[in-house]
Image (cartoon, grey):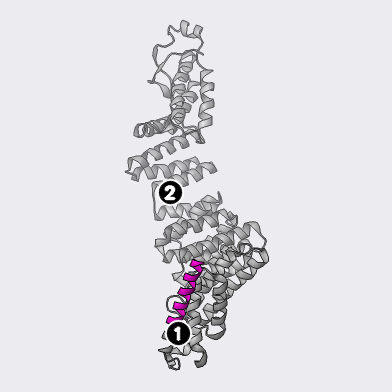
Amino acid sequence: MKTKKILLSAAFAFLATTSLMAQSQDFSDPKWAKWGKPEEREANVLNSNFLKEACDNRDYNLAAHYLQLLLEKCPSASMNTFVRGTTIYKNKINRAKSVAEKKVMVDSLMLIYDLRIEYFGDHPKYGRAYILDRKAREILNYMPNDRAAIREGFRAAIEANGDNTDPETVVAYFSNLCEDYKSTDEVMPDEIIAEYDRLTPFFEKNPEAAEYKKQFDAAFGLSGAASCENLEKLFKARLAAAPDDEALLLQAVTLMSRAKCDSDFYFEVGEKYYSVKPSSEIAMFLAQAFQTKGDYDRASKYLNEALAKEENPEERQKLYAHIALVELVSNDVANAAVAARQARDLNPEDGLPYFVLAQCYASSASACSGFSGQAAFWAAYDAMSKAVEYFDETSDFYTTAKSSLSAYRNRFPTSEECFFNEVKAGARYTVRCGTASGVETVVRTR
């Protein structure tokens, strides 16, 4: 009861204060014209104050009553009417007790945004462009199943804001468009391609939005619309108009690589980008692509070109390791071993050079006669053991490396063969044949 009295006292004090204020104002003055008809202005000003108080006290039903009065009598009086209107209906949405009630509140929230555009759309900072951006986000938040409304809302926001659009808004729109392509029949692949093409220049004009650009490209790449056929259609026309555009070439290479393209156009674009901006990273990318295609000569060419220009030891190590792999796959065992040793020396804790060396040793063992060939498998086993030690278990090579150890062990000489060749288990031994020639190892039996 005491609390109620205090609240009532505060309310009466407020009314008294506002009444005195009203008496001191001449509401017939033209400066009060925005508050409605002369005879209604005082009441409208008071209702605006009551709206604020109701919102501050979180009495949103009472606040909605004052909001309705202000929208009927003087909607253009204050932008705060609409700011508080969105607060009211967002809270009423969260407190709705049924789906039907929630829908009514969401519709009311959308109407508040539309009316705010009507009456304050020309505000220099918080005008139509700003309001449409906020509305689009609210549609996504409160109407997640109305996919058409989400797309339309974000398109309107982007169109209104132009180059000043928040990058997050662009990504939100395009990500949802791609999701709709994957999960509905409302969006066709041509629309995804067209929107990607239309919105890409936005990020070129806003280089500070690099992280959002990655999300934008990722959404396109994962959409399924970015098929090799569609990508070729998209980039052929753009590259024909700007064949030396470095950013455009990189974009084409990245997206077509992600789509695992293997067309002639894809390789042409990759080689063109390398000619514009040669780097070890792109050389490795091209080498991998040509290796997959079975063109080992061109794969080796790009890797060695990059190696000749690269000065960073870490990058040189990666190049040597990749060269070793390419040479191994093309059956040039001798050169594969040379490159693998170079890579190993630059980074002794990388498993890949040991993996290649082990296969080189095992491969050349067949060219060695008798016990010398068997001894080469000790060196192969040692190298592959190192590979297993340094490979992460998630590596593509780990399982192969583990199974190779068993295969090599089965090729070790028997105890009798070691006896007849006058060597003892555990003794040091220097391999004298094949690519492992000169490698020191330990005598073991099968």
**Residue name at image x 42 percent, y 30 percent:** 337
Task: Count all numbered tags in the image, as a single digit.
Answer: 2
Circle 1 — which element?
helix
Return the x and y of residue 443 as percentages of the image width and height.
Answer: 43, 13
Q: Is residue 129 visible?
A: no
Circle 2 — which element?
helix
Return the x and y of residue 346 as percentages of the image width and height.
Answer: 34, 34
Residue assigned mark 1:
19
Q: Amino acid at mark 1?
A: Ser
Q: Magenta span covers which residues?
A: 1-19
Q: Residues within 10 Å of mark 1 (few under 14, many from 20)?
A: few
- Quadrant assignment, res 386: top left
Of the numbered discs 1 and 2, the one sitting upstream in the chain is 1
Residue placed most toward the observer, 336 or 82? 82
Left or right: 445 in relation to 192: left
Q: Amino acid at mark 2?
A: Ile
Left or right: 256 in relation to 443: right
Q: Nearer the viewer, mark 1 or mark 2?
A: 1
Q: Residues within 10 Å of mark 2 (few under 14, many from 20)?
A: many
